[in-house]
Image (cartoon, coloured by chain):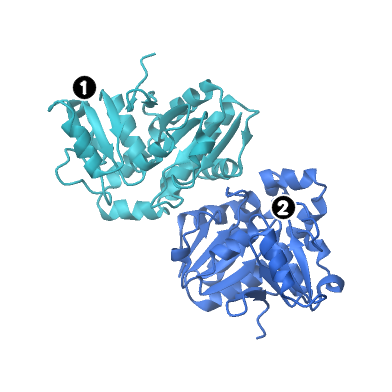
Chain colours: A blue, B cyan
């Protein structure tokens, strides 16, 4: 088993992802939000790239069965129901609903990984479960970080390092790519003080400036959920598998 | 002053590099070789992307004044004078000669950085001098790692981390991008045992398989040279500035 990491959505070669298991990571905040929404009973998450595409998808669904969610520049999109704060995706709000979602980095990374054999959603919130689910596939595993504006982002990098660490516990003989090795080391160095590490992320400052420190604290919680959202190719929907 | 790192040549946005100071890093082996060649009295290094381009450039020069150097798949190119081993670029061989050079990753990274205001060549061999020269420009600084087959490479990453560390000693108030922060940490964690870190690089195994351990040991020596090769835009040649 080979394990490696792409630091940005744009840095990933979709051809290389074909037939592999891909874990998408966008800690602040898309994959934390998707994990939360599905853990709280959302029927599914439909990832779309553009606001126009989101509205088009909404037009094809029965009113009352869906919610529009996501962000541009970390802010709610005009006319949408929800922004990209995982704390908005409570059971009361999302249970039974399909979430049509577009975000700046996260949904781009998800789309990039469509050629994968298994496309799973990972975050600190469900890290251990996500690693186990990926490991069970038996294929090589790529961790695809969304990054921020197509740059390496410390929050995603730390989460990728945690996932590599979990995967190597499950499969001690796994070969690690160079970035997987480096990020596992980064995570293990800072595991007891993740907020300190994340405070050096440029993305962190943007969210702090917007008063979103509670979102950050929420997203850095580890293994709160045991669910692993998975993209269902036929339905083009991220769901929780029934098994 | 802002300092950040691109992990691969392909990951760098040439537009972002415009007007900045860029340090090119390809430890194993292009920038180690260029540094060695110029330290040993080569007249200049002409970076070209393709073998055909190299032969075309050679045709325009007086026989005896130049050498063809570089590699494909880490091996000497048929008909070339030198491969990409820095230990071949001795004073006896290169003094006074122009080196026409094409490598798989390094010369690609150099070409990517042509829009930079100052394009400097860095390696472990000249790290401290390169950091000081970059710092003296006063602009933002990007470290552009060549990477290996467009992937993050631990050898370049460790050297980038050393350069960030040197730059931050010179400019304690410098802001670090996310990857600069992570790689400085990586370097500082392994500074006393770099060979151990580099032994985890996938590129390392390739060079070991080819019997090039002496090249690796050579390239990991720190601050052997005080010279900083710089791309001279008007002459399209990497040279040592006269001042």
To which chain does the residue with label 1 belong? B
> Could you tell me how many numbered marks the image carries?
2
Quadrant (top left/top right/bottom left/bottom right) for the C terminus of chain A: bottom right
Q: Is residue B204 visible?
A: yes
Q: Position of residue B162 (x, y in %)?
A: 50, 36
Q: Position of residue A49 (x, y in %)?
A: 63, 61
Left/right placement of residue A152 relative to residue A90 reads left
Residues marked 1 and 2, same chain = no
> Circle 2 sits in a helix, a strand or a loop, which is it?
loop
Q: Residues within 10 Å of mark 2 (few under 14, many from 20)?
A: some
Left/right placement of residue B195 relative to residue A166 reads left
Quadrant of res A224? bottom right
Closer to us: B223 or B229: B229
Q: Is residue A48 above or below residue B75?
A: below
The answer to whether the residues at label 1 and label 2 have Cβ atoms under 8 Å apart is no
Q: Position of residue B135 (x, y in %)?
A: 53, 24
Question: Residue at image x 70%, y 65%?
Answer: A54
Quadrant (top left/top right/bottom left/bottom right) for the N terminus of chain A: bottom left
Q: Which residue is mark 2?
A: A72
Q: Is residue A66 above or below residue B56?
A: below
Q: Position of residue A127 (x, y in %)?
A: 65, 66
Q: Which residue is mark 1?
A: B96
């Amino acid at each position: 088993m080979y394990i490696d990491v792409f630091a940005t959505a744009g840095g990933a070669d979709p051809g290389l992802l074909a037939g592999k298991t891909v874990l998408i990571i966008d800690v602040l905040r898309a994959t934390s939000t998707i994990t939360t929404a599905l853990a709280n009973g959302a029927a599914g998450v439909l990832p779309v790239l553009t606001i126009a595409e989101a509205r088009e998808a909404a037009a094809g669904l029965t009113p009352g069965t869906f919610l529009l969610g996501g962000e541009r520049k970390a802010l709610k999109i005009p006319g949408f129901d929800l922004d990209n704060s995982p704390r908005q995706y409570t059971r009361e709000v999302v249970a039974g609903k399909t979430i049509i979602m577009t975000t700046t980095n996260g949904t781009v990374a998800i789309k990039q990984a469509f050629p994968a054999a298994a496309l799973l959603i990972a975050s600190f919130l469900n890290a251990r479960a996500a690693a186990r689910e990926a490991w069970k596939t038996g294929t090589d595993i790529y961790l695809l970080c969304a990054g921020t504006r197509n740059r390496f982002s410390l929050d995603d990098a730390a989460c990728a390092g945690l996932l590599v660490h979990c995967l190597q516990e499950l499969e001690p003989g796994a070969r690690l790519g160079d970035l997987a090795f480096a990020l596992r080391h980064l995570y293990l160095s800072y595991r007891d003080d993740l907020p300190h590490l994340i405070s050096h992320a440029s993305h962190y400052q943007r969210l702090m400036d917007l008063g979103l420190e509670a979102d950050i604290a929420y997203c850095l919680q580890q293994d709160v959920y045991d669910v692993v959202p998975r993209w269902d190719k036929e339905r083009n929907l991220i769901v929780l598998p029934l098994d």
